[in-house]
Image (cartoon, rainbow, N blue to C red):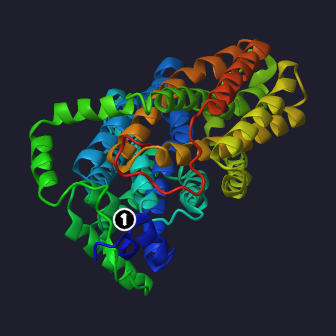
Amino acid sequence: MGDESLRYTLDEALSSLGFGTFQVFALVFAGISWFSEAMEMNLLSFIGPAVKSEWSLSPTQESLLSTAVFGGMLVGALFWGFISDAYGRRIGMRGVLVVIAGAGLLSAFSPNYMSLVTLRCILGFGVAGGHVFASWFLEFIPSCNRGAWTLSITAFWILGELFEASLAWIIMPRLGWRWLLGLSSLPCMLVVILSIFVPESPRYLFKEGRTNEALDVLKKVALINRQELPTCILDEENYPSEETPLLSSTRKKMNTLKTCLDTMFELFSPNLLRTTVLLLLLHLGFTFAFYGIVLMISSMSSEQNACGSVTMHAGNLQNTSLYRNVLITCSAEVPGLIIATVLLERLGRKLTMEMLTILAFVLILPLCFHQNEIVTTALLFGARMLLFAAFSSMTIYAKEVYPTSIRATGSGLATSFGRIGGMICPLVAVGLVRGCHQTLAVIMFGIVLLISGICVMFFPFETKGKGLKDIGSDT
């Protein structure tokens, strides 16, 4: 039994189990989670004007509703990543779901403006943990076509955006924004129930030295998929022993601060320093550019781009063009997802991100000069499509390039840093465009995309077709 030929790795075990019934269940669970999070994020497009009218808010107070969500996400992404790496994917996911469901439902009963802002900030804190679901799902997928399958979760996000726009179209004119908030929290409550049946990631269990539990999970996956695990023994040379990790795990839970510091030191260790810094910059650039383009679609292709003062009267709040425009612009993400899925496994992660970023840069260049509405909308539609594809590819790469021991924390840190771009982009996308400085706004986005493209070029690793690392230093 000591013969290396009679041993198998965790990647080999997952490959032998294939993508079967269990992975479909895991995809649906993670997908519905992203579906519910997308609904909560997308409803901000609809409740802002309604709340502003009902409570006589200033434009700054209205925008604070969105800023509060991004503020919560800024802290939450790193927090949930650390919790997931330190205490398990299941604990992290359940915590995320409870926060989103609770804050989402309570938002519908907000008695005043400040309580609504506070609850939306808490909700953003929960939504920021969405990357934990992707990390959990990723760790059940064989390396073959892993990127394409993980990207499929993004389809649920798009469906959530489209469903929320349709729901708002029905609910808002008839029942108002409180009913929209309440109904939008129901899918997340469903996922809370489903989480009872979700197993822990075997990679996390092996990393913690809980080998027997990990093997039990693999056996259940094999049973559900109607496959057989290899009859030889698991190669545990790269994992902690069964006894030692239990002690280290106990110490870790007694000293959370030390564990957090150790994780951060590993993220910025010599082997990972360049990767981590580049991912931080790329998340910042892509988030800034993507959300900026989303906002510019409404600012540049609507009647508000005439560089005049346009006032939205209360009677316009029910204008169906708002829902129609959101549906149209969200649909740009559908071909974006298809493009990313096709290219990711053929060209690799780095080349895909590089090519898509350059093409997005080329598409926004003509907007340095005023175009007619059709051309403007078409260019922004195409730029959003390409940036969504590049953004999705980046999220896959960020989860693959880190070892299991710090995967969720690393991804969470990068996501948190990116939220800074989401918080400041309205100042450029809306402020400059409505202030008749469209050329300056486009130039700024172009510079950001160029810097992002340069960051991609300097990534040291390509993860296409490679097994996931579990213990860190050799990444």
Res. 71 visible in picture: yes
Q: Amino acid at mark 1?
A: Leu
Q: Position of residue 220 (x, y in %)?
A: 32, 79
27 lies left or right of 246: right
Nearest to the observer: residue 72 or residue 226: 226
360 lies left or right of 292: right
277 lies left or right of 319: left
From what the image shows, is residue 26 above or below residue 225? above
Q: In terms of secondary structure, where does tag 1 sit?
A: helix
Residue 81, by quadrant, is: top left
Tell me the residue at 39%/47% (across/down). Answer: 403
Q: Which residue is mark 1?
A: 190
Residue 202, by quadrant, is: bottom left
Residue 206, by quadrant, is: bottom left
Q: Position of residue 417 (x, y in %)?
A: 46, 28
In the picture, the quarter occupied by the C terminus is top left
In this view, which residue lies farthest toward the front?
Answer: 3
Nearest to the observer: residue 204 or residue 304: 204
From what the image shows, is residue 214 above or below residue 156? below
336 lies left or right of 455: right
In the picture, the quarter occupied by the N terminus is bottom left
Q: Position of residue 215 (x, y in %)?
A: 27, 72
Tell me the residue at 60%/46% (across/down). Answer: 392
Q: Position of residue 235 (x, y in %)?
A: 33, 66
In this view, which residue lies farthest toward the bottom?
Answer: 226
Res. 312 visible in picture: no
From what the image shows, is residue 334 above or below residue 439? below
Crowding at mark 1 (Cα within 10 Å: few <14, some 14-19, many 20+) = some
Tell me the residue at 28%/56% (across/down). Answer: 239
Nearest to the observer: residue 279 or residue 322: 279
Tell me the residue at 58%/57% (across/down). Answer: 465
